[in-house]
Structures are given as C-alpha cells and as structure tokens.
Image: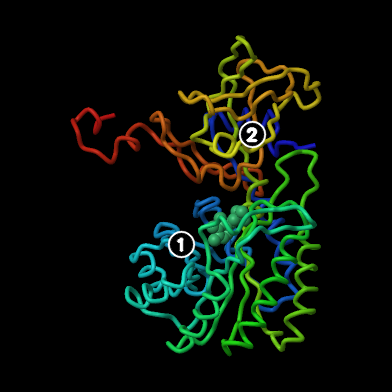
Amino acid sequence: MKQSFLTKEQIAEVVKTYPTPFHIYDEKGIRENARKMAKAFSWNKGFKEYFAVKATPNPFLMQILKEEGCGFDCSSLTELMMSEAVGSVGEEIMFSSNATPAEEFVKARELGAVINLDDFTHIAYLEKVAGLPKKICCRYNPGGVYAVSNSIMDNPGDAKYGMTKAQLEEAFSVLKAKGVEEFGIHSFLCSNTVTNDYYPMLARTLFELAAELKEKTGAHITFINLSGGVGVPYYPDQEPNDIIAIGEGVRKAYEEVLVPAGMDDVAIYTELGRFMLAPYGQLVATAVHEKHIYKEYIGLDACAVNLMRPAMYGAYHHITVPGKEDLPCDHKYDVTGSLCENNDKFAIDRMLPKIDIGDYVVIHDTGAHGFSMGYNYNGKLRSAELLLKEDGSVQMIRRAETPADYFATFDFTDYFQTK
Ligand SMILES: *Cc1c(COP(=O)(O)O)cnc(C)c1O
C-alpha cells in the first residue's frame, strides 16, 4: 500500500506556515535510495550517477545528491548554471543535450563538463563554437524497437536522439584524428522501465558496441553511460525495481563482454532522474470543491500546472487522503484542477474514500518530472517546494510564485509593477 510520508497531523502543522498546494520532498528517503544506488554499482571503480537535473531542478535537492556522491546530467544553460551554483563543475557534469544552441556548448566547455554529442554534425559545430575537448561521449540510437523479455518497451527508431552505428564509428574515427583521447558511449532507449532487465540488457548492447568500436577505430573507451530510464512503480500493485539486482545484472554483462575484450577499466555512468527522486516527492493539495453532475468531481487547489504528467501522458499518480487511510475506497471520483482545460484531471474514475471539503489530498510520486514540468497556463502560479528534513523539520526550498513573478517579464503600465 502506498502511504504518504506525512500524516494528516503533520500536514496540518505544515499548512500553518505554507498553504497548499505545495510539493514536499523526503530527505531521508532520498539519501537512503542514493546510498543503495551507489552500493548496487560499487563493484565498478569509476561508477558515477549523474542526476538528471531536468527531473527536479532545485539546488537544495541537488546539494543533497551531491553529498551522496552524485554528479549532474544537464541539458540546458540554466541546468549548467545550477550545477555550477552547487559547486559541481568539470567532470561532475555530463552535458547530454540535443539540438544544442552554441551558447550552451560554450558554457559546458567553460565548466569543463563531459560533453555527450547527440549527432555527427555536432562534431564540426562544437569544434567551431567552443573547441573539442580531450574526453567526449557520443549518443547511440540503434533504431527499430527495443524489447525486454519479449515485450516492446520503446521505439528508438522514432526517437530524435543519437547517432546510427555507422555514424558512431565515423564519429570516433574523426574525433580521434582531431586529438580526442578518451571516449564514452551513451544511450537512452526506454523510459520508466519497471523491470530489473532493462539496464543489464542495455549494458550488454553498449558493451558489445564498445568492444566493436574499440576494435574498428582504436578509440580508447573509458566509460559507458547507461543514462536514464530505470523507473518507479506509480501503481500501488507494481513490483518496484530492485536496484541491487540491476547492478548485479550490469556486472554480469560487464564480466561476460567487456572483461574478455580487455576493457576491464571502463567506468559505468548513469543519469537517473525519476528513480532517484520520484517516490520521495508528493504534491499536497486541499479539496476545495465537490460537484455532482453526470459524474462526481472533487476540485483541488492544485492543477495541471503543478503536475502535468496526468494531463500530458495520461499518467497514473496514486492518490491518498491522509487521515482516511483505513476507510473503504467506495467513492468514484474525477479529481480535477481549476484550469479551463478538460484534461486538467489528476485522476479519472478513481476509487477513493469519501472526500470532504477541506480534506488534504496527497498525489504521490511527484518528486521527479513533477514541479519541473510546471507551466503558467491560465496565469496559474507555480507552488512552493518544501523539504522534510531528516530531523523532522520542514524547510522551504522554493517559495510559491506571486502575481508579480508572473508579470515580471513585461513593462506595460505601473499597475503590474505594484501588484
Ligand atoms: C530525461 C533524461 C534522463 C533521466 O531520465 P529518467 O527517466 O528521469 O531517469 C537522463 N538522461 C537524459 C539525456 C535525459 O534526457
């Protein structure tokens, strides 16, 4: 059973200072999970998790992950700046971007980040705008569909990312001729996998490719970046990934493929976002309306601008009502926000306990790709982000937006400057 990491009483205490809606993160859960992740790959000397900043771009959370040994996977100027702000520069940064603007390559080079090239043409582009580094990564797209245990997981052939195998081989040869000394291979084939088989299978694919590229181009491959994609169980009846088993699966592939190829010094990198934070964040809202027409609706003070995944992907996020954990789920509701947009529904036909106006409603697993995908449609404002610290205290790690924030980018009349 999925339970909120805050009780009704704790939420009632928090809202005295910080009104709903807000996202809140659980420091203890974050740290324990990050340590397990590090343990799962401790067999690999150079292992590093580069947290995907886009999942939850908050420097306070980045600081916690940094303390747990993580670097940062960035793909934009401001993400690079956030990494710099928490003191992670140089090879603590993986810059895995695509369709990259020149200024972002310039910033990444200035910080000494490891650059992951998305396309063959980016070699000439990077060389021209910022120069080539000594260590570089190239992103691979095998095309076709990617299946794990006979079920199709995703469709790389339709994805905009990465290079074909032939391009990758040529890229390594060209880069080597231009003086690059160390190479990495990166690939992100499936998102939110809830199976222990994805990473080991991807690893085997990339290890075999690495051995082949070493053979053909003579490139010195020093790391393999398994990128993101290890998922979390959004549904309460899903079996979670076992990261220790996943680490073991990757080790097995390493020993069977890389070691015999004389490549036993290759470092494993990961760029997980969702797995690192999703379960350790929740969106806490209050039921402010109920409506009975052809269906039963509960209206919250949060809306899709606070959490876009249900509206955008039809994604499931579990919902609980603190204080009513033991009541039967015998009411069927659509749980909605206030946008003038009919897809602004956190849940459709969801069986929940009877909800009363004023009840707190917790939307689970919003710690990654939650707040960060927020937007300002309908002039709605972004919520605060809070941190439940290990000592039980609550710290505000981002304040809620005010109308002045929304009006800050134009200068029309004095009206907007005084609100
Ligand atoms: C989004 C992204 C990630 C993280 O993906 P998760 O599904 O959150 O693990 C990692 N690397 C790259 C390049 C990404 O774009």
Q: Is residue 392 left or right of residue 238?
A: left
**Amino acid type, label 2:** Ile
Residue at image point 65% right, 82% down = 212
Q: Earlier in the sequence, mark 1 or mark 2?
A: 1
Q: Residues within 10 Å of mark 2 (few under 14, many from 20)?
A: many
Q: State the residue position of label 2.
A: 363
Residue 100 image-quadrant placement: bottom left
Q: Residues within 10 Å of mark 1 (few under 14, many from 20)?
A: some
Quadrant assignment for ligand 1: bottom right
Q: Position of residue 80 (x, y in %)?
A: 43, 62
Outermost residue toward the top in this view: 293
Q: Visible in this render: residue 52? A: no
**Amino acid type, label 1:** Asn
Q: Position of residue 182 (x, y in %)?
A: 54, 84
Q: Is mark 2 within 8 Å of ligand 1?
A: no
The quadrant in which the N terminus is found is: top right
Disc ID at residue 155: none
Q: Is residue 55 above or below residue 92?
A: above
Residue in the foreground of this view, choosing between 53 and 219:
219
Q: Is residue 161 left or right of residue 33?
A: left
Disc ID at residue 98: 1
Residue in the foreground of this view, choosing between 19 and 162:
162
The CA span between labels 1 and 2 is 32 Å
Residue at image point 52% right, 29% down = 303
Helix, strand or loop for disc 1? loop
From the image, state whether disc 1 or disc 2 is nearer to you. Answer: 1
The quadrant in which the C terminus is found is: top left
Helix, strand or loop for disc 2? strand
